[in-house]
Amino acid sequence: MTASLQIRLSIAAVLALLLPACAATTPENDARFGLSVRATLASQVADPAAVRNTAPVSGIDGRAARGALQRYENSFGKIEAAPAGSAFVPMGLAVPN
């Protein structure tokens, strides 16, 4: 056996051993894809059957709800308009004075 043939056989043997490392594992991963997201979403739903309940909600009247919403919105204070010609600069990029 010549040295060239031995080298070629050695390379072929190494490649044959490395070939299973290229096998696809995506079917295993695809079967579980998004499972954690769906589980988290399902854990946040208090009553899954509530979507089929067509009975009107009772408890607070319209005037009380509107007043509560207005008090909530007013709790943030008034937002002043930005001066004309000013641009938004994110806090991380603002240059201190």
Image (cartoon, helix red, strand yellow):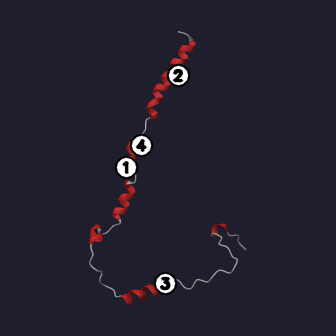
Q: Earlier in the sequence, mark 3 or mark 4?
A: 4
Number of numbered discs overlaid on the protein picture: 4
Of 24 and 56, which appears nearest the observer? 56
Q: Secondary structure at mark 3?
A: helix
Query: Which numbered mark, 4 or 2, is in the foreground of this view?
Result: 4
- In the image, residue 83 above or below residue 3: below
Of 96 and 53, which appears nearest the observer? 53
Q: CA distance from mark 3 to mark 4?
A: 49 Å
Per the image, the residue denoted by label 3 is: 73
Q: Residue at x 37, y 61 (%)?
A: 40
Q: Earlier in the sequence, mark 1 or mark 3?
A: 1
State the image coordinates of residue 97 (x, y, percent, origin top left): 73, 74
Q: CA distance from mark 4 to mark 2?
A: 28 Å
Local crowd at mark 1 within 10 Å, few (<14), some, or many (≥20)? Answer: few
Q: CA distance from mark 2 to mark 3?
A: 73 Å
Q: Is residue 53 left or right of residue 34?
A: left
Q: Is residue 94 left or right of residue 2?
A: right
Per the image, the residue denoted by label 4 is: 26
Per the image, the residue denoted by label 2 is: 11
Q: CA distance from mark 1 to mark 3?
A: 43 Å
Residues at marks 1 and 3 touching, judged by CB atoms closer than 8 Å: no
Q: CA distance from mark 1 to mark 2?
A: 37 Å
Q: Which label number is shown at residue 32?
A: 1
Q: Earlier in the sequence, mark 4 or mark 2?
A: 2
State the image coordinates of residue 37 (x, y, percent, origin top left): 39, 58
The three-letter amino acid code for the residue at tag 3 is: Glu
- In the image, residue 21 above or below residue 10: below
The three-letter amino acid code for the residue at tag 4 is: Thr
Q: Earlier in the sequence, mark 1 or mark 2?
A: 2
The three-letter amino acid code for the residue at tag 2 is: Ile
Q: CA distance from mark 1 to mark 4?
A: 10 Å
Q: Which residue is the extreme one toward the front? A: 54
